[in-house]
Every structure is written in structure tokens, then in C-alpha cells.
Image: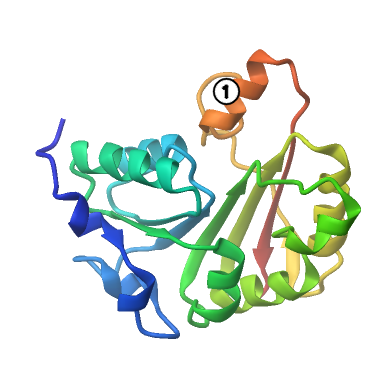
Amino acid sequence: MSEKLAIESLALKLEDLPQPVDPRTLFPCQDRPLEVEVGIGKGTFLVEQARRRSDVNFFGIEWANKYYLYAADRCARWGLSNVRLLRTDARAFVEAWLADGCLDALHVYFPDPWPKKRHHKRRFFREHTMNHVVRALRPGGRLFAATDHAEYFETMQAVVLGRSDLEEVPFPADLGGPGEIVGSNFERKYIREGRTFHRLAVRRRA
């Protein structure tokens, strides 16, 4: 295991960031590709990817404070200098803070489906939010998503695949372990429960 880092070197505060912000500028090595995960939970996917791909910078966003602190501790213990974390509302951050063309990839795995119709406006996959996702992706940048909620997946497909500036691409087969899509904590829990999963990958057209 790498030498433990100070959590303060990984955990950012929204009030300390410029607006808009290019997260690439927040890393020691700023010329690496940048991938963002929305809703990192306990950081299982983020930690594994950052350890496996040390030549990529990973920026994780989480709202739940206990999960955010747990993930920050894990990243610090592994000495992951290619990770930065932020506790904030991901949808608001994407819409109002991310600079144009700064992302090589955006990962959204098992987001809250907000199943009640009156709560659908809180979903991440909405047309307005996708406008900003596309704006923040560089040409050729990719969006990866997975969910266990069939109705929400239909919404994802309608919102994402209906855009002329995005094209569907194969979902990577090597993000998770054997029998997994991405190996997140939620996915592993849902595998034990026998749930069915849906996945989607798209690329921003040049």
C-alpha cells in the first residue's frame, strides 16, 4: 500500500473553488485525462480505478457526508494522489460549476431513481442536466451509466440516445470484476439480491 496521504489534500471544499472550475487544475499532474464519478458512495469503484490507472485523474462527488468521509479515508490510506473528492450536489455542480470541455469521462452508477413522479425533477438524467454534461465533455469524451431500475433506464435512454451530439458505444467489459459491470458497493449488494442491471455508454461527437 502507498504511503497514507492527508485527507485534507484529497477532500475539497466548494467555496474554495473558482466558478467555473476545470478540475484538471486541482491535481499535481494536470495533463492527465480526467474522469468524474457522480455519487461515489463508499468509493469502491473510484478507489479501484485510481489504483489500477495511475495515469488518469479521478474526481469524485458525493452528497451523503458519512459515505464521503468513508471514501476520503479509503483514498488517503491508499495514498491516491490522482484522486480529488468533493461533497456537494452533483447535478447542481455539473450544471453550474464544470468548465466546458474538461471531462474525458463521466461515470454515473446506480443513481437514486427518485421513483415517485413528483420527485422526477430531482433525477440526474434530465434534459437540462444532459445539456451541461455534453458541454463539459470534450469531443470524444464518454458518459457511462448503470442502474437496476428499469423505468429509470428507459428515461436515461430517451434523454441520452435522443441527442444528435451523442452516439452510443459499447460499454467497457473490464471496469468491474468477474460477473460485475463496475464493481461498485451498490452493485455488489444488488447482485446478492438478484436484481437485473441495465447499462449505457455514449460518446460526444466531434
Q: Position of residue 28 (x, y in %)?
A: 19, 66
- Is there any visible trace of residue 180 in the rendered image? no
Residue under the point 20% across and 57% down: 8
> Does residue 43 sit above or below 185 in this rendering?
below
Position of 111 compared to 18: left or right?
right
Q: Residue at x 88, y 43 (%)?
A: 151
Residue that extends furthest to the left in the rendered view of this protein? 3
Image position of 85 (left or right of 3)? right
The crowd level at tag 1 (other Cα within 10 Å; few <14, some 14-19, many 20+) is some
User: Looking at the figure, which quarter contains the C terminus?
Assistant: bottom right
- Residue under label 1: 188
Tell me what residue is drawn at x 57 percent, y 23 percent.
Answer: 188
Q: Quadrant of residue 136?
A: bottom right
- Residue 14 higher or lower than 190, as above or below: below
- Which of the pair 142/75 is nearer the observer? 75
Q: Position of residue 115 (x, y in %)?
A: 83, 45
Secondary structure, mark 1, is helix
**Figure check: 89 above or below 1:** below
- For the residue marked with disc 1, what is the amino acid? Arg
**64 lies above or below 43:** below
In the image, is 136 to the left or to the right of 80?
right
Q: Position of residue 17 (x, y in %)?
A: 34, 78
Q: Position of residue 163 (x, y in %)?
A: 82, 71
